[in-house]
Amino acid sequence: IKWTEGRGWHDAQLVPYAPLSLDPANMTLHYAQTIFEGLKAYRQPDGGVAIFRPEENAERFRASARRMGMPELPVETFIAACDALVTQDKAWVPGSGEESLYLRPFMFATEVGLGVRPANEYLFIIIASPAGAYFPGGVKPVSVWLSEEYVRAAPGGTGAAKTGGNYAASLVAQAQAAEQGCDQVVWLDAIERRWIEEMGGMNLYFVYGDRIVTPELSGSLLPGITRASLLRIAADLGHEVSEGRISVDDWREGNADGSLTEVFACGTAAVITPVGSVKSARADWTVADGQPGEVTMKLRKALLDIQTGAAPDTHGWMHRLG
Ligand code: PMP
């Protein structure tokens, strides 16, 4: 779907996957005015297909567009576009379990020019790909690297938007994590370098027995849809769940005195991933016993059961295709 200043949204098309041809002076290549989303369609037990919470992705896409000076795609148009693509690709939605059809909606400036200002032409596209189970061999805890040298996002910046620049800013730290033998980066706040924000592509949760805490939306971390869903599911399951501030010291000390019993990360790709160990320039530690925790696995199952239709959709989160 195209957007042009003075004309609005126009020319929706469903076309076979193919390369794009871009002018070298395309503004996106220079000024990175680009946003994206990630969501999944799951096969249901009756053979139908349902998308998990597309309204939430549509709303977050609008919020990202506002922050990046881009036009806001109406929620109904976003969902209708997802529906049209998934209907067309229905045969590619895997048959069962945690497998899914991953959808990647994105939008970028198509105007040609070298002036730094919001563009007046954009293209919105959705591509799709079948996605296997994230842990085909059983859930395996990840190791994380606390990035104290680099920051991903600062107050007043674009951290809460799903825009390419945030990921570009994270790549060097991700490479550092890999050099340290870690799977993922954990980001700290930009000002004090003390408060836990999120991981490279997932939000974090800290489990203290029955009590569960996730870092509050500081304005510089992404408001994850899995994170928001787990706030509800954890409460449904009787946990005391809250959003708050957790420092690196809280993490290390809670771990040492045994009050912190589990840590997990959550996002569309892996749903829930236990965090098994932490490495930083100053200290390394194993999270509890380093194994997937009971609360982590219980929440993982509860969410996946809703997504795959194994449990009733009591919150109305599954968007069924017609
Ligand atoms: N944080 C970042 C930086 C991400 O890229 C993602 C993945 N979209 C998340 C958190 C998790 O968000 P969601 O649950 O909506 O996938």
Image: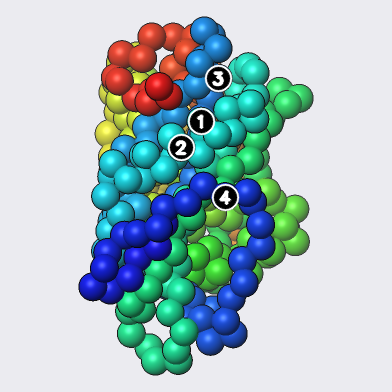
Q: Amino acid at mark 2?
A: Ala
> What is the three-letter code of the residue carrying label 3?
Arg
Report, in whole angstroms, how far the alpha carbon at label 4 lies from the one at label 3: 23 Å
Look at the image and tell me whether residue 254 can be seen: no
Please name the colour scheme applied to the rendered image.
rainbow
Name the residue beneath numbered marker 4.
15
Q: Nearer the viewer, residue 153 or 258?
A: 153
Check contact, mark 1 vs mark 2: CB within 8 A. Answer: yes
| Residue at position x 65%, y 18% in the image | 95
- Amino acid type, mark 4: Val
Q: Which residue is mark 3?
A: 43
Residue under circle 2?
Answer: 84
Which badge, 4 or 3, is on the more N-terminal residue? 4
Residues packed near mark 4 inside 10 Å, few (<14), some (14 to 19) or many (20 plus) = few
Q: CA distance from mark 1 to mark 4?
A: 13 Å
Find residue 299 and report its horizontal and vertical position in percent: 46, 21
**Mark pair 4, 2: CA separation:** 11 Å
